[in-house]
Image (cartoon, rainbow, N blue to C red):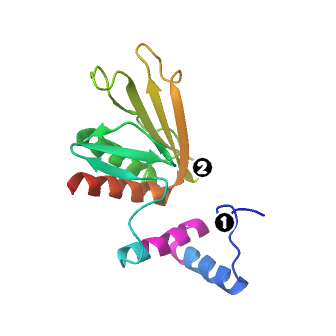
Amino acid sequence: MPSPTQMMKLPAARAGQIKALATSKGIGLGEAVEHLLNLAIEAGELDDALPGWEVVRDGDQITLTLDGQPIPPMHLEVAVEVAGHFQRAGTEMKVGRGVPQFWGFKSPEMPSAYMLGVGRHGGGVVVAFEELEPNCQIGQGKRTTAAMTRGMAVDLARQIRNAITH
């Protein structure tokens, strides 16, 4: 039996309504569901959180979990830039790679460097995180990738900005 993340059964009437909602807004069916979720978040009926994509502030650092995989903390200044990358990927970026964000260089508490890239692939957003050992080239480090929708990227950007300001 397929998991609910792969298939969701709806009565034909409800499927038609969701399709009509999507058509009226010029979005896809998945984006229509995201629209409904965002309305529930705005109304306070759902937490403003993406399970598996956590944002945690600890002092002057932000730690992200990308689809269940935690990555090393980044200073608030880096997190501001990362939030911008997610926002652009979700709203204006065309298909392709974004500009990678680096942190951890020459830091005694972080002997490795870290690279996070947010880009577009098809209708979605792809995130690549790579840990680079000293003298290691991009593409040769330990890499984690994850995929998300454009709406999720915008939500994650907002959650990062909220964590920075609170």
Disc 2 is placed on an element classified as loop
Disc 1 is placed on an element classified as loop
Cβ–Cβ under 8 Å for marks 2 and 1: no
Main secondary structure type of the part rendered in magenta: helix
Identified by mark 1, the residue type is: Pro
139 on left or right of 65: right
Which residue is at a point 41% across and 62% down the rendered structure image?
A: 49
Q: Is residue 120 above or below residue 153?
A: above
Q: Position of residue 67 (x, y in %)?
A: 51, 49
Q: Residues within 10 Å of mark 2 (few under 14, many from 20)?
A: few
Quarter of the picture containing the N terminus is bottom right
Q: Which residue is mark 2?
A: 122
68 in magenta: no
What stretch of residues is rendered in magenta?
24-39
Q: Position of residue 163 (x, y in %)?
A: 28, 54
Identified by mark 2, the residue type is: Gly
Front of the two marks 2 and 1 = 1
For marks 2 and 1, give the CA distance.
22 Å
Q: Earlier in the sequence, mark 2 or mark 1?
A: 1
Residue furthest top as drawn: 135
Which residue is at a point 50% across and 23% down the rendered structure image?
A: 141
Q: Which residue is mark 1?
A: 4
30 in magenta: yes
Label at residue 32: none
Q: Is residue 142 above or below residue 93?
A: above
- Quarter of the image where one finds residue 22: bottom right
